[in-house]
Amino acid sequence: MCVLPTHPSGQTPAPVVPAHALASFHQIVLPDLVLIDPKGVPATGLARLGKIHGLRDMLAVDGARISVGASPVNIIGVNPSQYRSWTPLRTATDDPLWASLATGGFVASPAARQGLRLRKGSTYPLSGAATLNLTFGGDAPLGIVGIDLVVGSQQSAKLGLVHNVAVFVSAPGKSMSALKHEVRVAVGHVGTLVSLRQQPLPVDAAGGGRPTTYMQLFRASAALYCPGLSWTVLAAIGQIESADGTNMGPSTAGALGPMQFLPSTWAAWGITAFGESGPPNIMDPYDAVPSAARYLCANGAGTPAGLPGAIFAYNHAQWYVNEVLALAQQYARLDG
């Protein structure tokens, strides 16, 4: 859980950073770890973090605990064009949501929308160093438990959020223990580290020898259902599509489950596997991951030459193909 510090009353707001125009979405960068420092991570610390071996990317955000009316909330302030790539695929591809954030509104997690009874298009008072009346632009999964609201850079400065209070770190090719150690060394052992990797499967450890983590399931599914396909490709798709089962959909296109199958595709390719019973279940990782391997293999993923086309068949976007292949290369380091 990501918990932000209470808004420090009277703190001087960070300098106003003009909101950037809405950029075209072209990649997903899901965080492995978040560093939270109630005083804000200084520029020197950010520079050292940027030199960590195996770092794929990092993103610093502002944040604090403020209030909406009488209700306390955790809020972060971001450059929408940068932060967009760090959200789940379902959220990142929601153009109207990002347009509302880029033009001065705020967005919320589904839980916060429900708890605060927010109505899209309505205006609400957000109170930090100042009170701003902002329009609610919509809700979507944010990928991080404990974050309620998101605003843009200009609104962040006016609310007086703590500058660089949190840093998201993506280094999928490093073990979590090694990554935590290097982050600690880089920032001088200050702040709180929270792992954001969602790997455990919903199964009892005594489940008859079945995989107990997503990583194990990706490896076993590739070996059994698509010899020649690296498990790292399944891992990349599972992370991009649902953050390993964290965001099960439905997507705006109606896709469901940990591998985000369209029901029509699932009807043709879904299988029951790894000792499960009954018809194929689109929401069950033990069915969904091997079904994805089977579908990819049928489209040519069992050979290096056919792999890009198979990934494109899974999601018809060249940026998606590039992103899956790049992330797969990062996961391959775990075998090094």
Image (cartoon, helix red, strand yellow):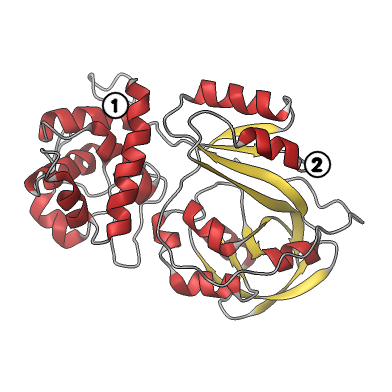
Q: Earlier in the sequence, mark 1 or mark 2?
A: 2
| Residue 150 spot, x, y in % from top left | 62, 61
Is the residue 117 above or below the residue 15 in the image? below
| Residue 21 spot, x, y in % from top left | 57, 72
User: Which one is in front, 210 or 60?
Assistant: 60
Q: Which residue is disc 1 drawn over?
A: 216
- Residue occupying image coordinates x 55% and y 56%: 83
Residue type at mark 2 is Lys
Q: Which residue is disc 2 drawn over?
A: 39
Q: Which image quarter is the C terminus in?
A: top left
- Residue occupying image coordinates x 92% and y 56%: 10
- Residue occupying image coordinates x 45% and y 71%: 95
User: What kind of element bears circle 1?
Assistant: helix
Foreground mark, 1 or 2, reads 2
Residue 308 located left or right of residue 44: left
Number of residues whose C-alpha sits closer than 10 Å to that of mark 1, classed few (under 14), some (14–19) or many (20 or more):
some
